[in-house]
Amino acid sequence: MATATLSVPSTLIAAPRNVVIFVADGLRPGSVNAQDAPTLHALREQGVSFLNSHSLYPTFTTPNASVIATGHYLGDTGDFGNALYTGYWMFDSGNFTQRAASGIPFIENDEVLGDLDDHFEGNYLGEDTLLALARAKGYSTAAIGKLGPVAIQDVTQLAPMDGRFNVPQTIIIDDATGAEAPPLPAPSLYDSVGDDLWALGLAPERTAMHLARERLEAMDVRTAVALEACDDGERASVAGVVTHRQHPETARGAVFVNLEDETGHVNVVFSRGAWARWKHVARHAPVLLIRGRVRKGQGAVSFDAERVEALVVGTAVPASRDFR
């Protein structure tokens, strides 16, 4: 819920009046009735009711707040969700004495919004807001309500000076007013990979296998690219995220499982017997550690599975795409 107010300059009209923009977060039309919301109901009945109103992005707060603030579609502001991929480590310049954090922050937070402003030339939305334009015309402005969407109504006022908030020209009152904002915990590398996968469906900088490599090296587990230096028939161990499983009818019972690590892909072949023995693991585990033999032929490298176990890597991984 957010309320923005504009106090009209006395030079414009003889009797100063206020303009109030009231936004209720998640309010269903049916909730505005004489029993549950009598004041809003009376305002609607005695004023104007616009029946064909739609949010630009159902269920997400900050995209709709950016639209109300600027009058621009999401393609102009770039605010497509309550968590955004920023392209940089948050607080990497030390703003608000915070340590560098995830590049996919939850932005219903004043310090996060301030750091975004600082990184994107003072206004992460890239568009003027109604309150900013009102201030330029001499109005006194205030925004009151929910943490995040309230500050977005005049978002440039959160841009830090010397790493701290400056006194805003618009009065901003939200959940963090009157108290020090709690410090954001520094994410681990595993947290960052999980955040990337949750928001993007991929990890553009690091992967779960990259983070597990030190442990895998101690177990003498080869990377996909290292298999190219192995001899045909050489025993080895490989590990990776399962990207897909295939069981073609023409393969005489063989099953193919593709593993991906930070260097590439390994095509693992399960014979009919190996699949019967290990399918309870190989069919369901998202990450596998497999021992077997390297096979080389016609310029290709594959891997015959002999022993299989599930591998825990400490973070989320993409789901596999399985076909018969």
Image (tube, rainbow, N blue to C red):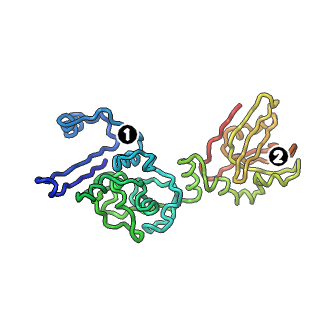
In this rendering, the answer to whether 207 lies above or below 57 is below
Q: Quadrant of residue 307?
A: top right
Label 2 vs 1, first from the N-terminus: 1
x%, y% of residue 23? Answer: 30, 45
Residue count near mark 2 (Cα–Cα under 10 Å), binned few <14, some 14–19, many ≥20: some
For badge 1, the amino acid type reads Ser
x%, y% of residue 7? Answer: 20, 55
Residue 248 lies left or right of residue 125; in this view the side is right
Regarding residue 20, the answer to whether it shows in the image is yes
What's the residue at 63%, 56% (across, down)?
Answer: 206
Q: Nearer the viewer, mark 2 or mark 1?
A: 1
Residue lying at the far left in this picture: please name it: 14
x%, y% of residue 184? Answer: 46, 61
- Identify the residue under disc 1: 55
In this view of the protein, which residue sits in the foreground, 74 or 110? 74
Residue 287 lies left or right of residue 112; in this view the side is right
